Image (cartoon, helix red, strand yellow):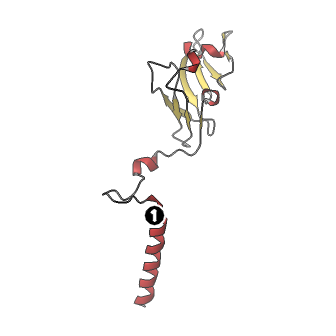
Amino acid sequence: MRAPLNALFRAVKRAGGRVAAPLRRNGGPNKFDLSSVDTATTTYEGDEGWAKRPPATLECPQCGGEILQHSAGDTIDCPHCVAEFGYEEFTELELLYLSCPVCRSRMLHGQRHPERFDIPEWATCDSCRYHWEFKHSYARDRRRG
């Protein structure tokens, strides 16, 4: 009875080793490339570029209502009053939140270079792990000329 259990144990151990082999590093105290922090923050879907920015909800400066701008190129029309803004006026309005295009949850968003850009540069959904990045060149800011 003991011999079959030992053989099964060795087979399972061998299979586990083959599964873990691509993640192992050669040498050093750390045996795996992925830390628990990396695996916990992995995103499942994503986009990059201003044209693929998630829907934005902005505050109307005239009535204080919420304005939904579905995509970055859409005009910004307040459904509560007569206020209307061009898409290029996005930075002049207060961004309340970005909505996940996958599950419609509010996304966490922020800027990495606030001294250079006055728009959100990233957004992540905690519900479904969707992530968006504003792709830009460090050599030249294309939005400002």
Residue 79 visible: no
* Amino acid, disc 1: Ala
Residue furthest left in the image? 29
Q: Position of residue 68 (x, y in %)?
A: 64, 23
The relative height of residue 32 versus residue 63 in the rendered view (above or below) is below
Q: Nearer the viewer, residue 12 or 100?
A: 12
The relative height of residue 124 versus residue 1 in the rendered view (above or below) is above
Q: Nearer the viewer, residue 3 or 96?
A: 3
Q: Quadrant of residue 135?
A: top right
How many residues crowd mark 1 within 10 Å: few (<14), some (14–19), many (20+)? few
Rendered residue at 42%/52% (across/down): 34
| 24 sits left or right of 63 in the view | left
Q: Quadrant of residue 29?
A: bottom left
User: What element does badge 1 sit on?
Assistant: helix
Q: Position of residue 94 (x, y in %)?
A: 53, 17
Assign the N terminus to one quadrant of the image. bottom left
Q: Position of residue 85 (x, y in %)?
A: 65, 12
Q: Which residue is mark 1?
A: 20
Assign the C terminus to one quadrant of the image. top right
Q: Position of residue 75 (x, y in %)?
A: 69, 17
Rendered residue at 56%/43% (across/down): 128
| 114 sits left or right of 53 in the view | left
The relative height of residue 136 versus residue 42 in the rendered view (above or below) is above
| 40 sits left or right of 106 in the view | left
Rendered residue at 54%/42% (across/down): 127
